[in-house]
Image (cartoon, rainbow, N blue to C red):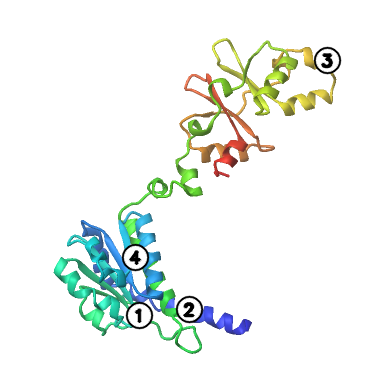
Amino acid sequence: MLEKAKEALKIEADSIRELIPRVDEHFQAAMDMILACPGRIVVTGMGKSGIIARKISATLASTGTPSFFLHPAEGIHGDLGMVTGNDVVLALSNSGETGEVLHLLPSLRRIGARIIAMVGNPDSTLARNADIVLNVGVTREACPLGLAPTSSTTAALAFGDALAIELLSARKFTANQFAIFHPGGSLGRKLLLTVNDIMHKGDENPMVPVDMSVKDALFVITDKGLGAVSVVDKDHHLIGLLTDGDIRRGFSRSLDFMTQPVEKLMTRHPRTITSNKLAAEALHLMESNKPRPITVLPVVDSENRVIGLLHMTDLVHQGVV
């Protein structure tokens, strides 16, 4: 059984390698047509090819090329109304003879949409009626019966990915643009969330004056529940940071420190961050601190006034970590 599985992977890997020489003038023509398209890329396919078509459409849409999937059976029953003469249709069919896809062709021509065929048979009906043909045919399927679409769907998916990635590069699509299309995903949160979005500010931002006793500062730390307070002067300029860890280490030395001002125990010149920085940058700053990572960051303005406090748990709750 294991040998059969390995052989299936090898066959599918070989089917992708066969595609490399086919990134040629036909591929370039498809690229040019899509880049010049004033509308959307309508991707269609039936059965297993339809599943691959859905994924290709989703990849295009998320990487800067507006796209949607059209089910061919639904298309011939009214959904063709979603297609306009400004659109390009990318039609997938391994045989190039899929009836539901072929039934779309007369209407697509009447609408005025351009057609790119991604087929396993470049001499098929679909290929003959397309403006551009992308040959994704494979030598053999990984299925030992030669029946279940395996290598052919893998090849079509990989060629679609190659097309999407080349379009992404041509459009100079950025990570920030990608995040705009993924606001609900962890990547979107990492790329779009700023420190200002999640920091504790106003009454939730714990600050104490530099002459406050450690004992009183401990009450503030306990009340705010962030494990630290920013130590500031009368104008809220940052002087240092006092954490519950500092206090625990103070207990190991003596009890006298509790009546001392916080400046005796605080960390001077702590790491800080500004509110406009990305939350991901704050995470990197915390994790890369030496000799050990830190869990809190005072947030300061351009004049080093404390305007907030950021805790590692805030990053965790927002899915940045």
Under circle 4, the secondary element is helix
Tell me the CA gap for discs 1 and 2. 15 Å
The location of residue 17, given as percent across then percent down, is: 43, 76
Is residue 75 among what the camera can see? yes
Q: Quadrant of the N terminus?
A: bottom right
What's under tag 4, amino acid-wise? Leu
Q: Read off the residue under disc 1.
A: 94
| Tag 2: amino acid | Glu
Q: Nearer the viewer, mark 4 or mark 1?
A: 1
**Whole-percent x, y for residue 48 in the image:** 41, 75
Task: Work out how far the residue at label 4 is from the one at label 1, CA to CA, in angstroms.
Answer: 17 Å
Residue on which the image places disc 3: 256
Q: Quadrant of residue 73?
A: bottom left
Q: Earlier in the sequence, mark 2 or mark 4?
A: 2
Q: Disc 4 designates what residue? A: 163
Q: CA distance from mark 3 to mark 2?
A: 72 Å
- Relative horizontal placement of residue 204, taking residue 168 as reference (left or right): right
Q: Is residue 165 above or below residue 214?
A: below
Mark drawn on residue 12? 2
- Relative image position of residue 217 (x, y in whole percent): 70, 17
